Amino acid sequence: MNNCKAIQISDGIYWVGAVDWSMRNFHGYETGRGSSYNAYLILDDKITLIDAVKAGFEDELIARISSVVDPAQIQVIVSSHVEPDHSGALRNIAALAPDAQIITTNPNGLKGLTARYGKLNYKPVKAGDAISIGKRTLKFVPTPMLHWPDSMVTYCPEEKILFSNDAFGEHLATSMRFDDENDLEIIMREAKKYYANILMPFGKQAQTALNALGGLDIRMIATGHGVIWRTHIDKILDAYKSWSAGEVEERACVVFDSMWHSTEILAQTITEAFAERGIPAAYYDIKATPLSDIITDIFTSKYLAVGSPTINNQMMPTIAAFLCYLKGLRPVNHKGFAFGSYGWGGQSIGMVEEELKASGVEIILDKIRVANVPTAQQLNDITAKILALNL
């Protein structure tokens, strides 16, 4: 028997989600601090549930709801997003409250939910639609491709609460529900990591969503993952404005793998050359740091240097995987170059350069290729080239 309790976040409104303390990977994104699957219960004339949790956590959701009200009394279920971390328990709740209307976007949410859960009591909505649940109104704002075609947010004007689903959230397991109850530096780091690894390709859509929300009076953002914002709302909104605009800083990231230390020596030289120019540089041995952490730093760093030795006429598999991951995220406003050592063929460095180009990185220095072990003169030449760059 699950003894989880609902947590009141406003008068008559409760967090009834689940905390996933043990999650360490979210479709390739390493989540060192776990996550939460947030759901919200509104007590009104029509009792309303906003979102359902990931499958496997349905008992926790039902226990929290039951600590406040009989789940059978739920009359409205808002499904903000078809992805299973938000809709996994939908069928369980629908079975307990079979007459409840399930609000979803038309047509994408309707198609997605039907494909996953079959025919239920769906009520599709579009931009500008609203429903009354008693003394409160729920207004629906579709946010397509933030980060699925069906995504939407829900605004309650009487409470000034934005139920934002994947927007403004972070993968963070915590027993404290609000932003001001947690370490702000950690929250913002995890929010940036979330944006960089999930929402980065959708900057234009994020800007569209921010514009749509711009006129709303918001006193609380109830997210789909992580903390609820009530004190630092301006800080997360300003961060999203900057991130969605592709703003970058005068920073460099040097990412590499190495077999016999030669490419590693090149990476050290390049890192120190950037520092000599007064540009802070981060040094990432790809074997030592999760891709999602590297991407978080690259996201707002203007410069990117990627290095690989050659193995079997190819780049190192670790670097190939990293560049595949990077290309899918479609970074903007980045400049960089490729480097690496080789024994005889040296094909990998050109491959790295081509993948950087395909990722949208502007090449500012011809690929650096060094046979065998770099000499002191070669290292001096590399430093000189970086110092001479017209950045």
Image (cartoon, rainbow, N blue to C red):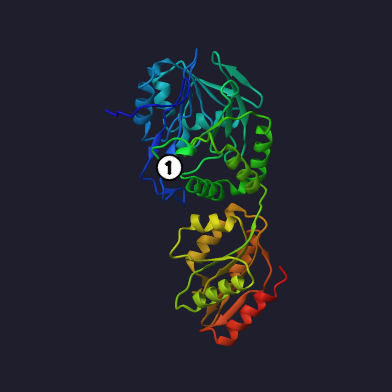
Residue at coordinates 57% horizontally, 74% vertically from top-left? 272
Q: Is residue 225 visible?
A: no
Dividing the image into 4 quarters, which one contains the N terminus?
A: top left
Residue at coordinates 45% horizontally, 78% vertically from top-left? 260
Q: Position of residue 35 (x, y in %)?
A: 43, 42
| 78 w.r.t. 314: above or below | above
Q: Position of residue 241 (x, y in %)?
A: 65, 44
| 92 w.r.t. 310: above or below | above
Dividing the image into 4 quarters, which one contains the C terminus?
A: bottom right
Pointer 1: what residue? 35
Q: Position of residue 46 (x, y in %)?
A: 50, 14
Residue at the left extreme, as displayed: 1
Q: Nearer the viewer, residue 373 or 328?
A: 373
Say what secondary structure mark 1 lies in.
Answer: strand
Residue at coordinates 36% horizontally, 35% vertically from top-left? 56
Under mark 1, the amino acid is Ser
Q: Quadrant of residue 62?
A: top left
| 305 w.r.t. 226: above or below | below
Q: Position of residue 70 (x, y in %)?
A: 37, 17
> Is the residue marked by circle 1 packed among few (<14), some (14-19), or many (20+) residues within 10 Å?
many
- Report the number of discs: 1
Residue at the right extreme, as displayed: 390
On the picture, is 238 further left or further right than 77? right
On the picture, is 138 further left or further right than 261? right
Q: Nearer the viewer, residue 309 or 364?
A: 364
Q: Quadrant of residue 140?
A: top right
On the picture, is 279 further left or further right than 313? right
